[in-house]
């Protein structure tokens, strides 16, 4: 599984859906429009420029995002990660498990 990298061209809403753990980082950099319409059309880099900092700081912002990113993988097949698509979170015997859609419907 290749660790995904956020390059700045991703749509804000997509990143939040895949990586809710990054909300704090976005929030700390002034990108707080999670609920508004712009989040579905604006890229991460545009959001940063528009809300917070100059273009020259985008690289540092992206680095911070990538460092904060957690990637869960399917605990059944180990071939699908949360980057490939949404995983279902399940509690199994008190432990948190992530299961991909294909394994979930088997
Ligand atoms: Zn799976």
Image (cartoon, rainbow, N blue to C red):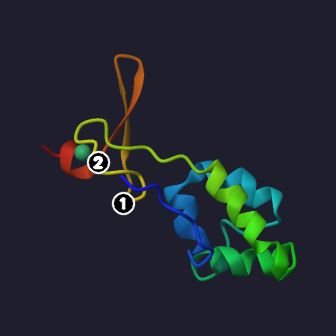
Looking at the picture, tell me which residue is in the foreground, 78 or 21: 78
Above or below: residue 4 compared with residue 87? below
Which of label 2 and label 1 is nearer to you?
1
Count residues near mark 1 (Cα–Cα under 10 Å), then give few for <14, some for 14-19, many for 20+: few
Q: Residue at x 59, y 72 (%)?
A: 7
Residue in view at x 82 percent, y 56 percent: 28
Q: Earlier in the sequence, mark 2 or mark 1?
A: 1
- In this picture, residue 30 sits left or right of residue 45: right
Q: Is mark 2 within 8 Å of ligand 1?
A: yes
Q: Secondary structure at mark 2?
A: loop
Horizontal arrangement in the rendering, residue 95 relative to residue 40 (left or right): left
Q: Position of residue 31 (x, y in %)?
A: 76, 67
User: Which residue is at the front of the view, 80 or 40?
Assistant: 80
Tell me the residue at 73%/51% (across/down).
Answer: 24
Q: Is mark 1 within 8 Å of ligand 1?
A: no
Total numbered labels placed on residues in the image: 2
Q: Which residue is mark 2?
A: 100
Residue situated furthest top in the rendering: 93
Task: Using residue 91 as the reference point, say whether residue 23 is left or right of it.
Answer: right
Q: Position of residue 23 (x, y in %)?
A: 67, 54
Q: Is residue 32 visible?
A: no
The answer to whether the residues at label 2 and label 1 have Cβ atoms under 8 Å apart is: yes
């Amino acid at each position: 599984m290749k660790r995904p990298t956020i390059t700045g061209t991703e749509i804000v809403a997509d990143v939040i859906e895949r990586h809710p753990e990054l909300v704090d980082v976005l929030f700390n950099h002034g990108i707080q429009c999670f609920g508004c319409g712009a989040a579905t059309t604006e890229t991460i880099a545009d959001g940063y420029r528009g809300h917070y900092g100059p273009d020259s700081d985008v690289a540092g912002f992206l680095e911070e995002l990538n460092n904060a990113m957690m990637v869960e993988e399917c605990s059944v097949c180990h071939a699908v990660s949360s980057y490939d698509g949404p995983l279902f979170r399940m509690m199994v015997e008190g432990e948190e498990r992530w299961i991909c859609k294909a394994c979930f419907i088997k």
